[in-house]
Amino acid sequence: MLTNSLLSLQYVYIISGEELTRLAKDFIKFLFTRRKIIRLTRAIARWGRAYRRMTKKDELQRDWLERAILNTPTWWHNPRQYKRYLGSRLASAYN
């Protein structure tokens, strides 16, 4: 079991190494010919997306507390409803 996982890990490492070698070759070609190869373009795009994800700041609304307070339903938003509820509770307590 352990050997299978080690072999699969080694396989992933070799594939990653081969891919890095190809990217290095593509980059050297780009330096000399100024033509982007699709593999290099995709890798740069992936790195850019990863960089944006790592550096992205969460947007914080300045009025988040006010919004939470205003959107919380409370009994004083509708006093008639509270009065009716309280009246029915008191009436059932006396019956």
Image (cartoon, grey):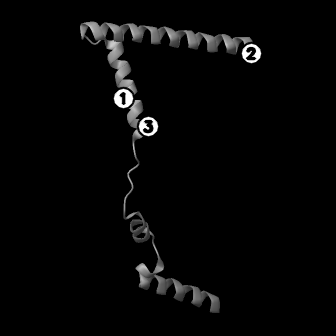
> Disc 2 vs disc 3: which is toward the camera?
3
Residue that lies at the very extreme toward the bottom in this rendered image: 94
Q: Earlier in the sequence, mark 1 or mark 3?
A: 1
**Amino acid type for the residue under numbered disc 1:** Gly
Which residue sits at x=38%, y=19%? 43
Residue 46 position within the rendered picture, expressed as x and y whole percent measured from the top left: 39, 25
Count neighbours of disc 1 (C-alpha within 10 A) and say few if under 14, some if 14 to 19, many if 20 or more.
few
Distance of label 1 from label 3 (alpha carbons): 10 Å
Residue 81 position within the rendered picture, expressed as x and y whole percent measured from the top left: 45, 81
**Amino acid type for the residue under numbered disc 2:** Leu
- Viewer-nearest residue: 28 or 71: 28
Residue 49 position within the rendered picture, expressed as x and y whole percent measured from the top left: 38, 30
> Disc 2 vs disc 1: which is toward the camera?
1
- Viewer-nearest residue: 25 or 61: 25
Q: Looking at the picture, does residue 88 appear above or below residue 66?
A: below
Residue 67: name its quadrant.
bottom left
Q: Looking at the picture, does residue 67 appear above or below residue 15?
A: below
State the mark number for residue 48.
1
Q: What residue is disc 3 on?
A: 54
Count neighbours of disc 3 (C-alpha within 10 A) and say few if under 14, some if 14 to 19, many if 20 or more.
few
Q: What residue is disc 2 on?
A: 2
Q: Earlier in the sequence, mark 2 or mark 3?
A: 2
Distance of label 2 from label 1 (alpha carbons): 36 Å
Residue 50 seen in this snapshot: yes
Q: Looking at the picture, does residue 88 appear above or below residue 11?
A: below
Which residue sits at x=36%, y=29%? 48
**Amino acid type for the residue under numbered disc 3:** Met
- Viewer-nearest residue: 95 or 88: 88
Which residue sits at x=44%, y=37%? 54
Secondary structure category for the residue under label 2: helix
